[in-house]
Amino acid sequence: MDRRSFLRTSAVLASGLAALAASLSPLRKLDDYVSLERFVQKYYKELTPEEMKQVLKRIENEVERQYGIRPHVRDLKPMDGVEYVYALNLTRCIGCRKCVHACVQENNLSRTPEIQYIRVLKMPHGSLDVEKGEHNYAPESVPEKGFFYMPVQCQQCKNPPCVKVCPVHATWQETDGITVVDYDWCIGCRYCEAACPYWARRFNFTQPSIPKERINPDMAYLGNRPRRQGVMEKCHFCIQRTRVGRYPACLEVCPAGARKFGNILDPNSEVSYILRTKRVFIQLKEELGTSPRFFYYFDT
Amino acid sequence: MTRALRDYLVFLRRCGRIAFVGDWRYYLWMGVLTVFCLLGLNAYAKQLVNGLITTGMSDQVSWGVYIANFTFLVGVAAAAVMMVIPVYIYDNEELHDLVIFGELLAVAAILMCLAFVTVDLGRPDRFWHLIPGLGQLNFPASMLSWDVIVLNGYLLLNVHICGYLLYCRYRDMKPSQWFYIPFVFVAIGWAVSIHTVTAFLYVGLGGRPFWNSSIVGPRFIASAFTAGPALIILALQIIRRVTEYHITDRALLTLRGIVQVSMLINVFLLVNEVFKEFYTGNSVASSQYLYVGLHGYHALVPWIWTAITFNLVAMFLLVLPLSRSLKWLNLTCVLCIVGIWIEKGMGLVIPGFIPTPLGQIVEYRPSLNETLICVGIWAFGLLSYTVFLRMSVPILQGRLAKTNESLPDPGMDGAPASLAAKP
Ligand code: SF4
Ligand code: SF4
C-alpha cells in the first residue's frame, strides 16, 4: 500500500468511527443497564435461599439509594391450602375509583407516566358488553342514573393466556392462584399484554417515577417492589399483604363494601359463601375458557 | 486440513475486501445507506436510554411498526426460497443460478427480522434469557419461542446453502449433492414453517378475535408468495442493470407466474374475510375499525383501502398479458409490494389492538424516532443485500475464483473499479 492510499484509508476509517461514536452518543446517559450483578441475575425459581437473600439486600440498597428510604423487601411464598378468589358486587360499586388510587399507592405504581392496574368501566344498564363501557367518565358525582360500574383488573385466570405465551417463563401462576411477573427476568416483548383478554397488563415504557414520600416500604419480590424501564407488571392481589393474611388494598378502601376476597378452599370463607349462595355470578368473557378467579355478582 | 482452512480463510478475506471496492455509484449507494444506518442507530440509542416511550406505542396498542415490518419481512424471507421449487422440482434451468440471489435475499430479510424484534424488546440486554440451556426458553408453549427457533434455523440453513454453493463455484468444484440438496428441501419446508409460525403468533391469541381466525395463516402465505417474488423480480433487474450478470426475461416471467397465482389466491381469501365480517352484521370491532372506522375513529381506513386498491389493480395487471412487458410488470410488482406491506403491517398488526379487550379506542401513529429506527433497519438490510451481491456476482461470473488468487481482486488497484468490470 502506498502512502497516499494509506492516508486515504485512515481518513475514511477515522471519519467512519467518528460518525459511529456520534450516533451512539446518547448511550452516555445509559446507567440503567450497566450493573453486572443485575445483568447476570438468575431466574427467580433458580435462586437458592442464600442467593435470594443477597438479591433482596441488593434491591433494598437500590431502593434506598434511589428514594432515600430503607424498604423491607421479602420473598413471600404461597401458603399451603390456599387459593385466592375475588368477588365483586356490581350492585354495590358506585364507580368512585378509590380502589384505583389505593392500588397505585400500595403497589408503588408509577405516577409519571401514570400506571394503574384497575380500570373502572361505566356501563349502561342492561349490558355486560365491555365495548359499551366508558373509560374516562368524569361526572360531578357518582353514581349516575342509568349506569352501573364495573372495575376490571387482572382476573388471575386459572388458564392464563399471558403465561402460556411468555417466551422466557418470566410470568407464571403460583399455587395460590396468583399470576406473578419476575421483573428481573422479563425481556419486555409485550406478548403477554397482547394475549391478555382483560387488558390487565401494564408495560413500563420508560423509567417509572414515584415521589419519594409516596413510597410504600413494605415490599415483596414478586409484588410491589419498584419496577424498572422495559418490563411488564400487573395486579398480583397485593401479594405483600395477602400472603401474610391481610386484605388487598382495593378491598380495604372500598367505601361501598363491593369487594370480597378470600380463600376458596376454605368452606367457611366469605367468598366460598358468596359463590355457594348467590344465584348469579359472572366470569368476564367466560367463553374464552380462561376461567377467571375473579367473579362479579349482584345482590339478589 | 490446514490447507483447506487456509483456502477458506483466503476466500473469506477476498470476499470481505471486495465489499469495499466498487465504482463511484457503488460508493455513493453504500455511503447513503450507511448514513441512514447511523441515523437509525442514533435513534435506537435514544430509545435504549429513554425506553419505548420514544415510540408511538402504548399499553393500548402495544405493538407497532416494528412488529409490522417484522411480519412483512418474514414473508419476504419465506418467499425468496420459493424460487427454489421450480428449479429443483421442475428442473427449470432458467432460474438455477438465480436461486442464490433469492436465498441471499432471504438471509438479508431474516437479518432485518431479527433486528426488528430486537428493537421491539423492552430489555434487549436480557436476550440471553431466550437461549436454551442458559435462559428459560418457554418451548413449546409459547409461539414466540417457536419463532425464535425457526427464524434462526432458517438463517443458518440459508447461510449454509448459499455459502456452500458459492464456495464450490469459487473453487470450481461440483457441489456434492449430499451437502446441499437435502438442505434445500428442508429449507423449502422451513420457509412455509417460518411464516405459519409467525401467523400462529397472532392466531393463538383467543382474546383478540381479529387475529383469532383460521384465515390469517393462509392469507399470510398467499401474500408472502406475492410480495416476495415481486421483490425478487425488481432486485434481479437491478442486478442485471448494474452488473454484467446475465438474467433472462424468461426467468423474470417465470417469477411473474408465481406472483400471478399467489395474488389471485390472496384476493380470493381477502374476499372471504370481508364477506364473513360484514354479511352477517356482527363483525369484529377491529374489522370495523380497519375497514370503515369505529365511533368516529378511522386512521387506518385510508390505508387499508389503498392497499386493497393496489392489490386489485395488481391482480388485474397480472392476469392481463400487458404485464408480460417489463415496464408494466415492474409497476405491478411495486403495487404488490406496497399493497401487501400496508396490509400485513398496518392492516394486520395495528387493528388487532383497536379497540382494546376492554373496548377502549386509542389510535396509533409511529413517532419520528420509531420511524428513523425502521428506516435504519431497512437501510441495514439493503446494505447487507448489496454486500452479499457484491461478493457473489463476481464469484458466479468466475471473476473471483481460486485460480486467480494471486491476481489482484477484480475492481481493485486501478483496474476498472466498477461493479460492471469486465472479466
Ligand atoms: S387477567 Fe390477563 S394478566 Fe391476569 S391472569 Fe388472566 S390473562 Fe393473565
Ligand atoms: S413482556 Fe415479559 S412477561 Fe410478558 S411475555 Fe414478554 S417476557 Fe414474558
Image (spheres, rainbow, N blue to C red):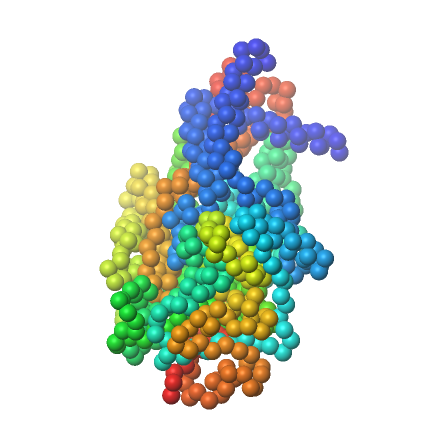
Measured as percent of width and height from the top left, residue B127 is found at 58, 49
Residue at image location 49% in from the left, 63% down from the top? A106
Extreme residue toward the right, this view: B1
- Quadrant of res A32: top right
- Left or right of residue B213: residue A106: right
- Quadrant of res B234: top left
Measured as percent of width and height from the top left, residue B356 is found at 37, 63
Most foreground residue, B277 or A251: A251
Residue at image location 62% in from the left, 66% down from the top? A76
Residue at image location 54% in from the left, 75% down from the top? A84
The quadrant of the picture occupied by the N terminus of chain A is top right
Measured as percent of width and height from the top left, residue B148 is found at 56, 53
Most foreground residue, A192 or A126: A126
Measured as percent of width and height from the top left, residue B125 is found at 57, 46
Q: Is residue B183 above or below residue A87?
A: above
Q: Is residue B358 above or below residue A210?
A: below
Residue at image location 58% in from the left, 11% down from the top? A2
